[in-house]
Image (cartoon, rainbow, N blue to C red):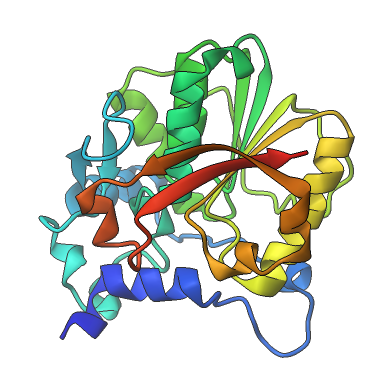
Amino acid sequence: MHSRMVASSVVRRLVACPRQHGRRSLRQQVRHVVSTQEPEILKHQILAETTVSREHLTPELALHLITPTCRLWRAPPHLSPFPDPFWAFYWPGGQAVSRFILDNPGLVKGKTVLDFGCGCGASGLLAKSVGAKKVTFNDIDEVAIEAVQLNASINKIMVDDVTTTNLVGSAGSPHQVVLAGDLLYDSKFAGEVLTWLQEVNRSGSLVLIGDPGRFALEGHPLKASLHCLAKYELAPTTLLENSGHPQAFVWTFS
């Protein structure tokens, strides 16, 4: 049944955040997704369970993704070697931010960039490819960091720095530009992320937020503080894994 597919399961968890447990704050709940596998084994698993795809808004970049041609697209979740392979999908908000960077390279050229919640790393990799001085890739999932390394390798792009630290709530930002795609998928978590990103913006960083119009952003009071920079129509392949959002937007703080 479709409801048992790995891809479908990941999409459902993106819409209904799995970090909601009781009344603990999300900052307390967030933990590293740590793999017990050695990096070389992880890389082999990623290569075995994904395919290289350019069927997205940034075909300039090849990415190792789970697509309908992959075993895991239809496999029951318990057969996946990865606990939560969010990094194996190129979500629409990330695609929008990435396309926007390619269309406006001057925003990141010569600057330090944070790809926050980087997933597959597309936005940060493209920022580096158009001249960013230094890009830091951040994701609490250590498997995502291995995927970033593989995606960097296939595109011949250098990875400057990686971190699996939970940055939400940290003071200030040493980065001139912060990229945040598809992180506003749960109302409470969206509030914590938006509040932190607003503080990062006030400290002097340019914040670019990618989102396809999920309720967590559309219904949040801080939405009024955002200005839409771009809108993109999504490719048909993206709609298969995206719960029907036909467009994606890039926002920044007014």
Residue 252 in the image, given as x and y percentages of width and height: 68, 39
Tell how many labels: 0
On the picture, is 178 further left or further right than 16? right
On the picture, is 223 further left or further right than 140? right
Where is 169 relative to 6, above or below? above
Point 38% across, 27% down: residue:
152
Point 50% across, 36% down: residue:
97
Residue situated furthest left in the rendering: 69
- Whether residue 59 is visible to the viewer of this picture, yes or no, is yes
Residue 62 figure quarter: top left
Nearer to me, 199 or 89: 199
Residue 17 in the image, given as x and y percentages of width and height: 55, 74
- Whether residue 108 is visible to the viewer of this picture, yes or no, is no
On the picture, is 123 further left or further right than 251? left
On the picture, is 124 further left or further right than 224? left
Residue 36 figure quarter: bottom left
Point 36% across, 48% down: residue:
90
Point 31% across, 27% down: residue:
61
Residue 4 in the image, given as x and y percentages of width and height: 24, 83
Nearer to me, 242 or 147: 242
**Which quadrant is home to the C terminus?**
top right
